[in-house]
Image (tube, rainbow, N blue to C red):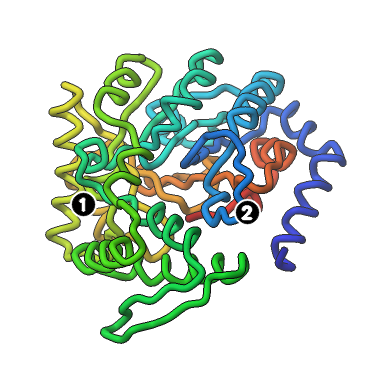
Amino acid sequence: MSNNGWWTASRLQFTYFSGLALASEWNGRGAGVILRFDRVRPARRDRFQPLRAREVTPQFLDGLLRALTRWNCPVISIDEACARSARGGSPGRFVCLTFDGGSRDIATYAYPILARHGVPFTVYLPTAFPDGVGEAWWLALEQVIARSDRLALLIDHSERRFDTARHCDKVQVFHFLASWLRTMAPAALTAAIQDLCKRYSVDLAAVTREAVMDWDDIGRLAADPGVTIGSATVNYPVLANLSDVVARKEIAMGRAVLQAALGRDAPHLAYPFGDRGSFGPQHVASAKEQRFASAVTTLPGVIGRGALDPLALPRIAWDGRKHSLRGLRVILSGLMPGAARGIGPSG
């Protein structure tokens, strides 16, 4: 843990055990939090899990919802979160649940728990995935590295070789290649990941198809009035890698496809990846031009006192390796809005 991470964790623990957070709740203070999840599935035994930080278990999700009930902290929809943010002043304590990427785990593991607790939630969907043409390249990259002791691929027109026999090497190579792929324009990224999958016999289409919901799954979720289906563009690209014209089209078409498939508007947006460098002011302006009601990022923060742009809302991403319900309660108390960074990674 970095010094900054240690200090943040220590402050959260002190604020919790000192009783300051509880006192703040009694005094009517509080902050709202939009939580972001990617996958909800049972724990795996595999040692190499470079995306573990993006996962929580069904048991953890159930425990979180039980804790929120004990704390008398409401779970509200994205529409209500936007309304509270727009009122000004203190929005009070609340949690808004959001899920990115359209993972099949949402329908299989998360939805039964969320429905049993009767809480609303939002799914941000890249429409190319249920259409069968999306590419979950990060999952394919994980499989390529998991099954290989050595890798070779073209980077900047030169053959590069990587030793991936040891676990630590696999983790390092995964994060290096994932960062490299994220810098690419979509056509170049597709060519690179398809070349890598072909070399190491990974079926990219099958990996993606197995991991994501189809339109039947999405239709069943959408039939629940407590579920909001939002857009995450068509192909889930890094918007900053696109021309402004293409980025604007990605944002518009994702909404249009959802509207056609569901028979109703989809006025809520999630910027793909949503961290610093993946989108910019021009994309926020595009969302405004297209009259989205809200757009969420993965930049950490809370909804407390002070105005927030509804088209650049912060979210807290839960780290699947370290969970702190105590830390979340402190943040909901409104005492430490800056401590949102201590809960988990933002990308």
How packed mark 1 is, by other alpha carbons closer than 10 Å (few <14, some 14-19, many 20 or more), is some
* Tag 1: amino acid: Ser
* Distance of label 2 from label 1 (alpha carbons): 42 Å
Q: Is residue 153 left or right of residue 174?
A: left
- For residue 288, say whether it is visible: no
Residue plotted at (66% across, 33% down):
29
How packed mark 2 is, by other alpha carbons closer than 10 Å (few <14, some 14-19, many 20 or more), is few
Q: Is residue 72 above or below residue 231?
A: above
Q: Quadrant of residue 264?
A: top left
Element under disc 1:
helix
**Which numbered disc, 2 or 1, marks the residue closer to the eye?**
2
Picture coordinates of residue 318 (x, y %)? 58, 44
Q: Which mark is residue 241?
A: none
* Tag 2: amino acid: Arg
Picture coordinates of residue 85 (x, y %)? 45, 36
Residue plotted at (21% across, 40% down):
132
Q: Nearer the viewer, residue 84 or 143?
A: 143
Picture coordinates of residue 6 (x, y %)? 76, 60
Q: Which residue is mark 1?
A: 286
Whichever of callouts 2 and 1 sits on the residue coming sooner in the sequence is: 2
Element under disc 2:
loop
Q: Which quarter shows the N terminus?
A: bottom right
Q: Which mark is residue 47?
A: 2
Q: Quadrant of residue 189?
A: bottom left
Residue plotted at (26% across, 22% down):
216
Q: Nearer the viewer, residue 44 or 282?
A: 44
Q: Is residue 43 left or right of residue 36?
A: right
